Image: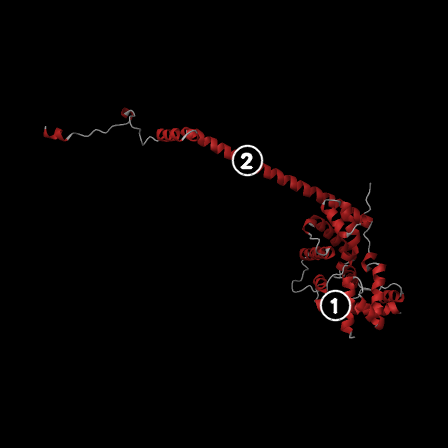
């Protein structure tokens, strides 16, 4: 008999994964794949490379799942693993700059073409269409994971004040779009 | 109410996942907060913006096969560790038994130690050649012979 893992809470899936249930872990992969991918893409990583790092991050997470404490945020833990995986990759490629790898939320390049921006802005009912990867991650962490700004800032390599400021600016932008 | 206080209300609404009576009353008079709270409710119902990226079937298959290898490696590691610990324990016990038995062979008198205190004392003195027992056969030991002082007078 196959179990319907979709109905389980993340903490239950983590417990099942700890007992070696691969399908429970696969459900966690399905749930958090997008967040990890957008998080990595927020560093300016290409989608194909981000997918490789995401895969390694999930495999590592399964290997270390006994080390995860359910009192903490699973997504936060995953992002930490993904970030370390990314840094390791850069170190191997000798591209890691130890002087600072700050993830500046305010000055990230918008890699969308002007045409794409016009099209996405035109779709008023699709609030997420015009969001940058890191903005999507910010909404996910704050609104859906209810993560405190201090922790968000830690993941995004920013200050708590900056994370708070960017979030509220984003909300204002979405609110305007929503009103219109 | 200032913008800062409105932001606090929004933050509280997100953290608590609900709007309390006081904030609800404020939202009725503040169009910005009302609009933001409505937006947040819409976001919550429409799902996360990161959920539009779904893993491909190939990605999931690749992860699952890696998990199988990881699980097998973990179980093999545990088995190997158990085997190594078991072998080390067996070797230690065997070594202890061997050293104990070889000591017993070199010192036969020691075996009677547990029987009684008297026999133990006897055995110890018997095994010590430097301390002959009273009444033991003196001829068994070498005797030094010195010239007698009367020999010189003669």
How many C-alpha atoms fall within 10 Å of the one at disc 2: few (<14), some, or many (≥20)?
Answer: few
Please state the horizontal and vertical placement of residue A147, each as a whole percent of the image. 74, 61
Q: Residue at x 70, y 41 (%)?
A: B72
Up-down: is A108 above or below B87?
Answer: below
User: Farthest residue in the left direction?
Assistant: B154
Residue under pointer 1: A164
Please state the horizontal and vertical placement of residue A153, each as a whole percent of the image. 71, 64
- Of A154 and A150, the residue lying toward us: A150
Up-down: is B33 above or below B67?
Answer: below
Please state the horizontal and vertical placement of residue A23, each as a whole percent of the image. 78, 46
Quarter that holds the C terminus of chain B: top left
How many C-alpha atoms fall within 10 Å of the one at disc 1: few (<14), some, or many (≥20)?
Answer: many
Please state the horizontal and vertical placement of residue A155, each as a whole percent of the image. 71, 61
Residue under pointer 2: B91
Chain for disc number 2? B
- Are the numbered discs 2 and 1 placed on the same chain, yes or no? no
Up-down: is B77 above or below A29?
Answer: above
Q: Residue at x 71, y 51 (%)?
A: A61
Up-down: is A49 above or below B132?
Answer: below
- Of B142 and A44, the residue lying toward us: B142
- Of A37 and B95, the residue lying toward us: B95
Q: Is residue A106 visible?
A: no
Q: Residue at x 47, y 33 (%)?
A: B100
**Residue B27 sits in which quadrant?**
bottom right
Total labels: the figure holds 2
**How many angstroms separate mark 2 from mark 1 (CA)?**
62 Å
Chain for disc number 1? A
Q: Identify the element where label 1 is drawn.
A: helix
């Amino acid at each position: 008999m196959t179990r319907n893992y979709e109905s389980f809470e993340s903490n239950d899936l983590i417990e099942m994964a700890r007992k070696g249930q691969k399908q429970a872990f696969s459900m966690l992969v399905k749930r958090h794949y997008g967040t990890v991918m957008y998080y990595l893409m927020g560093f300016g990583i290409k989608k194909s490379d981000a997918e490789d790092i995401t895969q390694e991050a999930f495999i590592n997470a399964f290997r270390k799942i006994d080390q995860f404490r359910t009192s903490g945020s699973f997504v936060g833990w995953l992002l930490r693993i993904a970030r370390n995986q990314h840094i390791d990759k850069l170190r191997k490629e000798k591209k890691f700059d130890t002087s600072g790898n700050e993830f500046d939320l305010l000055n990230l390049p918008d890699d969308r073409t002007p045409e794409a921006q016009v099209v996405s802005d035109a779709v008023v009912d699709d609030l997420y269409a015009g969001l940058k990867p890191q903005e999507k991650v910010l909404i996910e962490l704050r609104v859906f994971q209810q993560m405190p700004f201090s922790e968000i800032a830690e993941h995004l390599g920013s200050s708590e004040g900056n994370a708070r400021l960017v979030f509220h600016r984003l909300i204002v932008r979405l609110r305007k779009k929503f009103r219109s | 109410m200032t913008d800062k206080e409105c932001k606090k209300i929004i933050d509280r609404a997100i953290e608590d996942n609900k709007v309390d009576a006081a904030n609800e009353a404020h939202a009725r008079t503040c169009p910005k907060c009302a609009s933001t709270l409505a937006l947040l409710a819409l976001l919550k119902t429409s799902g996360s913006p990161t959920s539009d990226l779904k893993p491909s079937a190939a990605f999931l298959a690749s992860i699952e096969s890696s998990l199988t290898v990881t699980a097998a490696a973990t179980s093999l590691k545990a088995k190997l560790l158990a085997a190594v610990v078991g072998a080390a324990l067996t070797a230690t016990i065997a070594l202890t038994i061997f050293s104990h038995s070889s000591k017993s062979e070199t010192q036969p008198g020691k075996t009677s130690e547990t029987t009684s205190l008297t026999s133990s004392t006897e055995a110890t003195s018997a095994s010590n050649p430097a301390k002959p027992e009273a009444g033991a056969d003196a001829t068994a030991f070498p005797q030094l012979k010195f010239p007698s002082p009367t020999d010189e007078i003669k």
